[in-house]
């Protein structure tokens, strides 16, 4: 009986972490019991932020969405957000008599816990967990932040029914009243983040490759909604719906680890030799496509930008400067491209 039980447990773990077969679709689940997103009640799903803009105080729930939804500014395009929120903030729906949040948190997809930060003070995320998901398109990561309690450890194999912790309000900018789960989903910029930090004179890194600055998120709420409506999704098809904002062409220097980890970025299996790569990004900087390019460039160069009647710096995390159909990479933008293309000395020892 014991052997049978052990075998069943081992089989469940194997299935949970097995890579999804090519062509197989992915079903995503909400990470908490808050399902207001699917009931057309976004104001009950997203956690509000306290805002003061032009002398008016408000608590907009839209500030809990993904995208440029914070630090409002009046521009020729009207009022726009200039600060990117790279994930979504999900309200707590269960509280005790002291108004402490009780919501339990579960993975949005099967995977493997690859990092746990149990220290509230070492990150703006507070206590957070990162889970790796192996998809046909590549390696993806979901990040869950502001835990009160973490119930998992690195190496654990998890499913969408596994409790990984309890929602809380650890980290910067959260309070008991605003207790929420911050959720991100995306890809890793580089598997050598410590080497990158060394090359740019960065500070102390407590989180290795799973530092939030090395994880780049896409709009996880649209993925959750699409999966709910369709039953299952193909990540490549969903991400292809995202709007491109700019393209950067870089000299081609051997293989690009970014596409080795995320083959969906290359539309064709045939990759001819070329002097450069052209990378297409969303406004948030999420890579959508990488193509061989015949363009000769000496260094990273913006080769296209979506025309905007505002400063591009306001819509690109200050990675671009310029306005209209003209843009150039800022120092911050150059560092971002350097990180993504791993254009820095890499130590022969593991990070």
Image (spheres, rainbow, N blue to C red):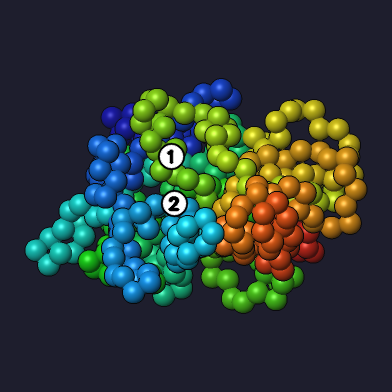
Provide residue 52's location: percent of width, then percent of height.
Answer: 34, 71
The answer to whether residue 125 is visible is yes
Q: Residue at label 1? A: 222
Q: Residue furthest top?
A: 23
Residue at 29 percent across and 70 percent down: it is 57
Q: Nearer the viewer, residue 18 or 236?
A: 236
The answer to whether residue 17 is left or right of residue 59 is right
Q: Residue furthest front?
A: 76
Give the crowd class for mark 2: few <14, some 14-19, many >=20 residues within 10 Å: many
Residue 71 occupies quadrant: bottom left
Q: Residue at label 2? A: 66
Residue at 70 percent across and 31 percent down: it is 267
Q: Which mark is residue 178?
A: none
The answer to whether residue 188 is left or right of residue 120 is right
Q: For the residues marked 2 and 1, what is the alpha-carbon distance in whole angstroms? A: 9 Å
Disc 1 is placed on an element classified as: helix
The answer to whether residue 336 is visible is no
Provide residue 107's location: percent of width, then percent of height.
Answer: 38, 44
Q: Are marks 2 and 1 in contact (CB under 8 Å)?
A: yes
Which quadrant holds the C terminus?
bottom right
Which quadrant holds the N terminus?
top left
Provide residue 76's location: percent of width, then percent of height.
Answer: 54, 59
Residue 342 occupies quadrant: bottom right
């Amino acid at each position: 009986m014991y052997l049978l039980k052990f075998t069943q447990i081992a089989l469940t773990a194997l299935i949970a972490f097995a890579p999804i077969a090519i062509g197989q679709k992915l079903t995503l689940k909400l990470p908490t019991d808050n399902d207001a997103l699917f009931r057309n009640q976004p104001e009950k799903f997203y956690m509000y932020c306290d805002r003061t803009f032009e002398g008016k105080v408000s608590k907009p729930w839209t500030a809990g969405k993904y995208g440029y939804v914070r630090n409002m500014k009046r521009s020729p395009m009207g009022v726009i957000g200039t600060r990117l929120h790279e994930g979504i903030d999900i309200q707590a729906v269960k509280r005790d008599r002291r108004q402490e949040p009780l919501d339990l948190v579960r993975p949005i997809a099967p995977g493997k816990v690859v990092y746990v930060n149990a220290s509230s003070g070492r990150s703006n995320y507070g206590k957070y967990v990162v889970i790796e998901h192996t998809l046909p398109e590549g390696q993806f990561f979901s990040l869950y932040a502001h835990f009160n309690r973490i119930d998992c450890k690195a190496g654990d194999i998890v499913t969408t029914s596994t409790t990984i912790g309890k929602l809380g309000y650890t980290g910067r900018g959260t309070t008991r009243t605003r207790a929420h789960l911050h959720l991100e989903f995306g890809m890793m910029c580089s598997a050598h983040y410590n080497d990158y930090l060394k090359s740019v004179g960065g500070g102390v890194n407590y989180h290795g490759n799973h530092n939030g600055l090395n994880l780049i998120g896409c709009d996880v709420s649209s993925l959750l909604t699409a999966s709910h409506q369709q039953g299952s999704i193909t990540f490549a098809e969903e991400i292809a719906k995202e709007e491109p904002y700019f393209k950067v062409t870089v000299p081609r220097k051997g293989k690009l680890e970014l596409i080795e980890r995320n083959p969906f970025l290359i539309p064709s299996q045939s990759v001819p030799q070329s002097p450069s790569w052209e990378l297409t990004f969303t406004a948030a900087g999420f890579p959508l496509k990488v193509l061989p390019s015949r363009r000769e460039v000496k260094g990273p160069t913006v080769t296209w930008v979506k025309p905007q009647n505002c400063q591009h710096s306001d819509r690109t995390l200050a990675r671009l400067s310029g306005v209209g159909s003209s843009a150039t990479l800022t120092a911050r933008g150059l560092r971002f491209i350097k990180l993504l293309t791993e254009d820095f000395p890499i130590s022969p020892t593991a990070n």
